[in-house]
Structures are given as C-alpha cells and as structure tokens.
C-alpha cells in the first residue's frame, strides 16, 4: 500500500513537471535577478533544508517512541499514518520547488526538488524495513506484557 501511495505521489509530481514544461505554469514569470527571484530561491533552499529533515525526524520519533503502548495492528496503522505524513511533507516541498523553478527558470528550485526526490526514494518502504519495524514492535510488546 505504501509503495502504491509513493508511486502516486511521484506520478503527481511528474505531471506537475510536465505541466510546467507545457507552459501552463508561466515559465519565467519572475524577472531574473529581482528580489522576488532571490526570495523564491531562498524559500526553496530553506524549505528543503527544514521540511525534509523535519519529516524524517518526525517519522523516526513517532515510530520508535510510540511503539511501547501498541499491539501489532495498531503499530502497522501508526507506521502507515506517519509514512503518509512524511511523504506528504516531502512531496509538498518538491512541488513548491518545481513551481519555483518554472517561475524563475533558475536551477536552484530544480536542484532542491531533486534533493527532495532523492529523499523520497530513500524513504520508499520495503518489505524488509516493515519487517524490522514489526520485530521491534513485537519485542517491545512481549517485554511489556511479561
């Protein structure tokens, strides 16, 4: 399920990029060298530097600290919820960077979007990661109930 949701997010981001390439997003609407371009580029860099690590840290904190009070089914639902929150935060950051790229035609937005895509590939859920997560849940649940 998580893989499918990740693929849907990537497809939507690709569609956004194609829309920009087709000129639906007004390409170069911000004048080069202007204050607006500078502010948009700064926002791209800051959003990538703040939101992406924040999403990763929120996921880590909430899926490790909250496990001690949950059974297996609750833990899987909790893992899914926080995976979706992480995917949403990273995808919104990437979408903003793509839009800023087409508005400014400056590669800063594109590079920040590519960094966000690299993180989303890193976060792609695998069967092995979910199994490791569930082993932690089961060991904490057994220790708690003994």
Image (cartoon, helix red, strand yellow):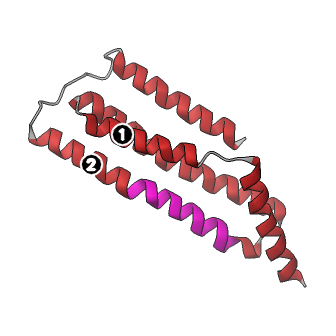
Residue receiving disc 1: 96
Question: Any mark on residue 140, and which?
Answer: none
Q: What crowding class fits label 1: few (fewer than 14 Cα within 10 Å), some (14-19), or many (20 or more)?
A: some
Residue receiving disc 2: 43
Start-end of magenta stretch: 50-66
| Disc on the earlier residue, 1 or 2 | 2
Residue farthest toward the right in the current orientation of the protein:
146
Residue at 42 percent across and 20 percent down: it is 18
Relative to 103, 51 lies left or right: right
Contact flag, marks 1 and 2 (Cβ < 8 Å): yes
74 in relation to 112, above or below: below
Q: Quadrant of residue 124?
A: top right
Residue farthest toward the top in the current orientation of the protein:
22
Please check the rendered image and state whether residue 42 is part of the magenta-colored stretch, yes or no. no
85 in relation to 62, above or below: above
Instruction: Give percent across and percent down for residue 112.
Output: 35, 43
Instruction: Give percent across and percent down for residue 146.
Output: 90, 85
Secondary structure under the numbered disc 1 in the rendered image: helix
Residue at 22 percent across and 33 percent down: it is 106
Relative to 144, 23 lies left or right: left
């Amino acid at each position: 399920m998580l893989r499918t949701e990740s693929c849907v997010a990537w497809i939507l981001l690709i569609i956004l990029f194609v829309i920009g390439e087709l000129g639906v997003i007004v390409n170069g609407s911000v004048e080069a060298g202007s204050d607006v371009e500078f502010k948009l580029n700064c926002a791209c860099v800051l959003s990538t530097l703040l939101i992406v690590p924040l999403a990763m840290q929120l996921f880590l904190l909430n899926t490790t600290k909250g496990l001690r009070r949950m059974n297996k089914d609750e833990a899987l639902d909790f893992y899914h919820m926080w995976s979706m929150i992480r995917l949403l935060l990273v995808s919104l950051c990437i979408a903003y960077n793509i839009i800023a790229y087409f508005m400014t035609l400056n590669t800063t937005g594109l590079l920040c979007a590519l960094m966000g895509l690299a993180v989303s590939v890193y976060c792609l859920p695998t069967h092995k990661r979910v199994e490791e997560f569930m082993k932690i849940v089961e060991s904490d649940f057994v220790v708690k109930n003994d």
